[in-house]
Amino acid sequence: MKRFSQQDVAESEHKYTYADFTSEPTEFQLPEGAPYRDRVAVLEKKVGELEATVAYLKADAKSVDDFFRARIGHLVGEFVERCREATPPIVEIQQAVEEMFHREANGLAQAIFKTLVAKIQPYALKAQS
């Protein structure tokens, strides 16, 4: 990919003049002395061609838009399906969390019980002596 430099921009600049915007295109120019009706007819013909071009471009834009909307919708559907396949269902996640919670809770309960037994047992032995 070509990067544009300041020199490229300077070379591509075109100096416009007032005449560039005020002179009529050659397709609208009629021979000297031609009636205005001929000139109007040429302009009407050009307007008709432009309207047909606009309608054609609108139809093309709509078909391109419809194509991309359909393609994007299809890709989103594929993405969602792949995500569903890659992640376990919510029920499985909930069960795994519940099992982990019970395991941790049982481990904590056993640690508390051992600590209490260790604290109580020396006092229990002193009372019997």
Image (tube, rainbow, N blue to C red):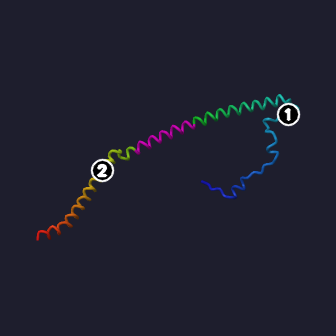
The residue located at (30%, 53%) in the rendering is: 101
Say above or below: 121 vs 88: below
Q: Mark 2 or mark 1, which is nearer the start of the sequence?
A: 1
Q: Nearer the viewer, residue 21 or 99?
A: 99
Question: Disc 1 marks which residue?
Answer: 31
Which portion, as a residue range, is magenta? 64-83
Q: Name the residue furthest front.
A: 127
- Which amino acid lies under the numbered mark 1 shown in the image of this protein? Pro
- Which amino acid lies under the numbered mark 2 shown in the image of this protein? Glu
Q: Name the residue furthest right.
A: 33
Where residue 24 sits in the image (x, y, percent)?
81, 39
Where residue 78 sits in the image (x, y, percent)?
44, 41
| Element class at badge 1 | loop
Where residue 117 sits in the image (x, y, percent)?
19, 64
Where residue 107 sits in the image (x, y, percent)?
25, 58
Asked whether 33 falls inside the magenta stretch, the response is no
Image disc number at residue 98: 2
What's the distance in space between the residues labelled 1 and 2, CA to CA? 92 Å
Q: Nearer the viewer, residue 100 or 6?
A: 100
Q: Please identify the quarter of the rendering in which residue 61 is found.
A: top right
The residue located at (25%, 56%) in the rendering is: 106
Asked whether 82 falls inside the magenta stretch, the response is yes
| Element class at badge 2 | helix
Q: Is residue 29 left or right of residue 96?
A: right
Mark 2 burial class by Cα count in 10 Å: few <14, some 14-19, many 20+: few
Prevalent SS, magenta region: helix
The C terminus sits in image quarter:
bottom left
Q: Nearer the viewer, residue 111 or 72?
A: 111
Looking at the image, is mark 1 or mark 2 nearer the viewer? 2
